[in-house]
Amino acid sequence: MLTFTGIHITKEFGAPSIRDIAVQGMRIVRFSGGGKIFWPIGMHMLLVADLLPEQLHVHGLLHNAAEIAVADVPRPMKTNEASELEDTVLNRIYASLGAPAPSAAVKAAVKKADFRAALAEGVLGCCARGFPQTQTGFHRDRDAEHLLRKYLAQFNPMDALDADGRWSLLYERRLRIVLRRARDGSRNLTGR
């Protein structure tokens, strides 16, 4: 596939740029379009980052970045092969951006924030009706819902679809900032 900026990505090579992730992430709708509103993976990644401690924001902003190359396939439909390919592309994204790979503990924290975001999205209409109630251990997460409401109050789908729209540019700016911090923190830990 070719990205927005023209980068070639296959199963064997390639990784999208920050600009590709920002633009295409705002154009891929979550839950196969099953929500009452258009809600892209880029907005979801912003929400997940906001549900994490600041030092983990880079991982929240990148956790679904591979989907710009492999698509957002809902869990019950995603095969093991598709999951492995998504992991491979995500690893290439981390490497190409010079970001420290997430540890098992970081992956667990991101997964928890991702689930909290998905449940809030379900309650507030960003995904198919009844989604939250199908999840084991569902309970309302008022903090996640509050953060999501703040985004929804400002969200205009046309701003997300426009490559130079508010949301693509906001996502890109935030990712560049947290990547710089993550790289600096990684260098401080390794002494380089």
Image (cartoon, grey):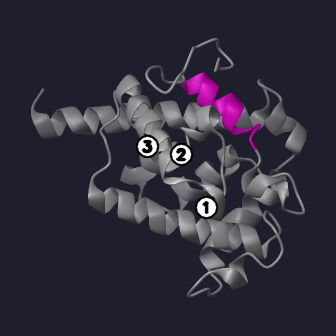
Disc 2 is placed on an element classified as helix
Q: Identify which amino acid the numbered label 1 is placed on.
A: Arg
> Which x, y percent locates residue 78?
59, 55
Q: Nearer the viewer, residue 94 or 135?
A: 135
Q: Which residue is mark 2?
A: 82
Q: Nearer the viewer, residue 79 or 31?
A: 79
Looking at the image, residue 13 sits to the left or right of residue 120; the answer is left
Q: Name the side, left or right, on which 44 lies relative to 151.
A: left
Q: Label 1 crowding class (10 Å Cα cut-off): few <14, some 14-19, many 20+?
A: few
Q: CA distance from mark 1 to mark 2?
A: 10 Å
Point out the residue furthest to the top here: 6
Mark 3 belongs to which amino acid? Answer: Asp
**SS for tag 1?**
helix
Q: Which residues are magenta?
A: 18-28
User: Up-down: is 81 above or below 148?
Assistant: above
Q: Is residue 109 left or right of residue 137?
A: left
Q: Earlier in the sequence, mark 3 or mark 1?
A: 1
**Residue 75 circle label:** 1
Residue type indicated by callout 2 = Ala
Of labels 2 and 3, earlier in sequence is 2
In the image, taking residue 149 as reference, residue 170 lies left or right, namely left
The spot of residue 167 in percent (x, y) is 73, 38
Residue 113, above or below 6:
below
Distance in Å between CA atoms under marks 3 and 1: 14 Å
Residue at position x 74%, y 75% in the image: 131
Looking at the figure, which quarter contains the N terminus?
top right
Residues packed near mark 3 inside 10 Å, few (<14), some (14 to 19) or many (20 plus): some
